[in-house]
């Protein structure tokens, strides 16, 4: 099993008799990503960027520290070399993302797309991804496979973006998909952050549910 799977799973394991955790693997990934981009971050920023309350962020930071992914000081929270290694492994699989306007394949007021490299084979019907997005408070997720230079829905060969050349151009230029890649679009009506976390949660589910079986 990949090190990043073990690491994220451990961080979101609760320690008896503590209460149920109000954060998920997606929050661990998003926190690592945030620190990777900025070098370091504050708890206030984590609350804002992860859409979590202070208590949840405090516990998240505690768990991430326990597993040696981050270290904290008065100057803020930064990554350890272990955290950086795991973050980079994850970013190699999810190397690109972007916000999308509403269109025929992205049905929320806010939509966010993430590329999952070479995981097309792991997608079944797309319902699992949709459920993972809904779990984050989103309205749903759209899963597109990149095959024969087209974006297609699971179990279809029809070009889903035939009538959306603008969206196709955005996805192709920003995400640079290759044969066998997946694009997951999280959609939310409440705000962009929900759409983003929904897309990332669905992407992690796709990776994890496959990797766990190997």
Image (cartoon, grey):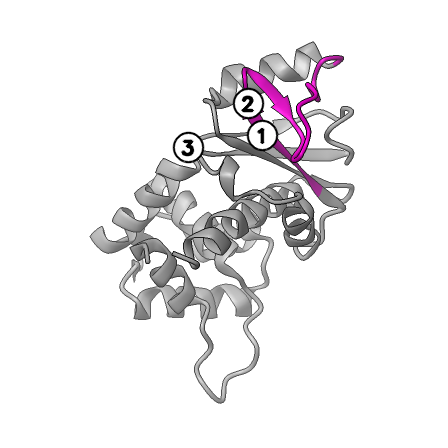
For the point 45% across and 73% down, the residue is 13
In the image, residue 202 above or below residue 156: below
- Among the two numbered marks 2 and 3 on one chain, the one whose residue lies closer to the N terminus: 3
Mark number displayed over residue 145: 1
**In the displayed structure image, the side of residue 137 where residue 28 appears, left or right:** left
In the rendered view, would you say 23 is above or below 166? below
Q: Is residue 150 magenta?
A: yes
Between 81 and 141, the one nearer to me in the picture: 141
Please tell me whether mark 2 sits on a helix, a strand or a loop. Answer: strand
Q: Nearer the viewer, mark 2 or mark 3?
A: 2
Mark identifier at residue 95:
3
In-image side of 163 versus 114 (left or right): right
- Horizontal side of 125 relative to 31 (left or right) equals right
Q: Residue at x 78, y 25 (%)?
A: 104
Return the x and y of residue 58 as percentages of the image width and height. 46, 68
Check if residue 182 falls in the magenta segment: no
Q: Which residue is the site of mark 2?
A: 147
Q: Residue at x 32, y 54 (%)?
A: 2
Question: Which residues lie in the magenta part?
Answer: 141-163
Q: Secondary structure at mark 1?
A: strand
Quadrant location of residue 99? top right
Element marked by disc 3? loop
Q: Position of residue 18 (x, y in %)?
A: 50, 84
211, above or below 18, in the image: above
Seen from the viewer's position, the closer of residues 70 and 124 is 124
CA gap, disc 1 and disc 2 = 6 Å
Neighbour tally class for label 3: few under 14, some 14-19, many 20 plus, Cα within 10 Å: some
Q: CA distance from mark 1 to mark 3?
A: 16 Å
**The residue positioned farthest toward the bottom in the image shown:** 17
Residues under numbered marks 1 and 2 in contact, where contact means CB atoms less than 8 Å apart: yes
In front: 99, or 181? 181
Tell me which numbered mark, 1 or 3, is placed earlier along the sequence: 3
């Amino acid at each position: 099993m990949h090190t990043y799977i073990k690491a994220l799973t451990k961080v979101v394991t609760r320690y008896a008799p503590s209460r149920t955790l109000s954060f998920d693997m997606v929050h661990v990934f998003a926190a690592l990503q945030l620190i990777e981009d900025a070098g370091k971050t504050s708890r206030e920023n984590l609350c804002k960027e992860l859409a979590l309350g202070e208590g949840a962020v405090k516990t998240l930071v505690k768990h991430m520290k326990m597993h040696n992914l981050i270290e904290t000081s008065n100057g803020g929270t930064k990554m350890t070399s272990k955290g950086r290694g795991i973050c980079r492994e994850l970013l190699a699989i999810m190397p690109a993302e972007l916000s999308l306007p509403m269109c025929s394949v992205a049905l929320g007021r806010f939509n966010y797309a993430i590329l999952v490299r070479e995981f097309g084979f792991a997608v079944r019907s797309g319902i699992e991804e949709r459920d993972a997005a809904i779990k984050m408070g989103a309205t749903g997720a759209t899963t597109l496979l990149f095959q024969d230079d087209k974006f297609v829905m699971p179990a279809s060969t029809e070009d889903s973006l035939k009538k959306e050349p603008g969206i196709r151009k955005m996805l192709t230029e920003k995400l640079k998909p290759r044969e066998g890649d997946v694009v997951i679009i999280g959609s939310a009506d409440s705000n962009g952050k929900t759409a983003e976390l929904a897309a990332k949660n669905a992407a992690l589910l796709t990776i994890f549910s496959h990797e766990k079986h190997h």
